[in-house]
Image (spheres, grey):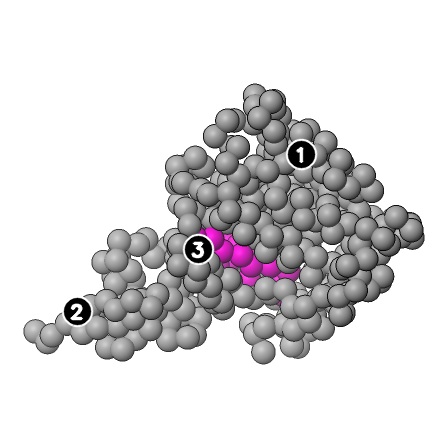
Amino acid sequence: MSEAFTLQVNGEERTCSPHTSLPTFLEQLGLNPRLVAVEYNGEILHRQFWEETEIKAGDRLEIVTIVGGG
Amino acid sequence: MDTPQSSHSKSISSSHLSSPNGELNVQPLTPTELERYRRQIMLPGFGEESQQQLKDATVLVTGVGGLGATAALYLAVAGVGRLILLRGGELRLDDMNRQILMTHDWVGKPRVFKARATLEAINPDVKIDAICEYVTAENVDSLVQSADVVLDCAHNFTERDLLNAACVRWGKPMVEAAMNDMEAYLTTIVPGLTPCLSCIFPEKPNWDKRGFGVLGAVSGTLACLTALEAIKLITGLGTPLLSQLLTMNLSHAEFAKHHPYHDPECPVCGEKTRRMAGTKQDCPA
């Protein structure tokens, strides 16, 4: 099995195992994929492509979690 | 390309902000108003024309708490002609760290009536309707129809979803502002033109409306930015957050802008988006 690599999540370094899909990675971060918006390497990533997107070394993810307070 | 510039806000002013029901309600600025607003009329790109647009506008504020009431305060002092304040329930003592229109002796009484009294004392030229209700399926359509711009400052997703859907139905711009602890986000939704709340977040979590901590300075920061979005929409000043999601982490004073996904298949706004894209080639995808 190949080694874990690092990527940036909201400006902080995180590690990830190879062949991890975006929704799986979000779950590993303790997030519910349906309750976040994700900017992937500076681009909007359409939800329909999330499942087929594998996290790679050096990726930059900006994750916004839904909140509802006022 | 995906971020409409100020020219859009001018067109929003003309196409979305006419008086409800086509009613002409132009009352010229009085000498008192011209003096009260002198310092903002001086702003480049503002002037008496923008001040008149504010006076002619009606803004619906839902959720008159730390966020909504503070936003309403800045809309009142800016000279928005009519504010509709909507919030059920009574003032609690633990609201008093952030609900700056309230006073200690009002605890236990309906917030919206105190909010109206405070705002009327600060600016007697603003007409204020205070409605002691939450957003419901029964009241949302008539409320949204009676406003030019809507501020979504509710403290729960039931009200937020109802309001988002009604704004899409009636084509009303909605400023979406929400917070949790030291974090907040803000975006301005123009139905069909920008992502709606359901495009950005298709599902909503279980949410405890009193389950998070809040400092008044945090809800107040978000509130000022929320009021500013409404002022920009009404007057065309600057560039509103159209198709942009501004996030704030106020623990670290970090601000970022993101480009949310506009879902062409969105069950709430998809049909309107497709209709508008059919008539307008430069509509953002």
Numbered disc 1: what chain? B
Residue B19 screen position, x and y as percent: 82, 51
**What amino acid is at disc 3?**
Leu
**Earlier along the polypeptide chain: callout 3 or callout 1?**
1
Residue drawn at point x = 43 percent, y = 52 percent: B183
Label 3 and label 1 in one chain: yes
Q: CA distance from mark 2 to mark 3?
A: 32 Å
Q: On the picture, is B240 further left or further right than B83?
A: left
Q: Nearer the viewer, residue B142 or B41?
A: B41
Q: Is residue B195 above or below residue B104?
A: below
Q: Is residue B136 above or below residue B262?
A: above
Name, please, the residue furthest toward the left: A1
Q: Is residue B199 magenta?
A: yes
If the image is split into quadrants, where does the C terminus of chain B sit?
bottom right
Please state which amino acid type lies under the numbered disc 1. Ala
Q: Secondary structure at mark 1?
A: helix
Query: Residue B243: percent from the left, percent from the top?
Result: 56, 66
Looking at the rendered structure, which numbered label has been put on residue B258?
Answer: none
Residue found at x 74% / y 40%: B122
Magenta-drawn stretch contains B170 = no
Residue B39: name its quadrant.
bottom right
Residue ID for mark 3: B250
User: Which label is found at residue A17?
Assistant: 2
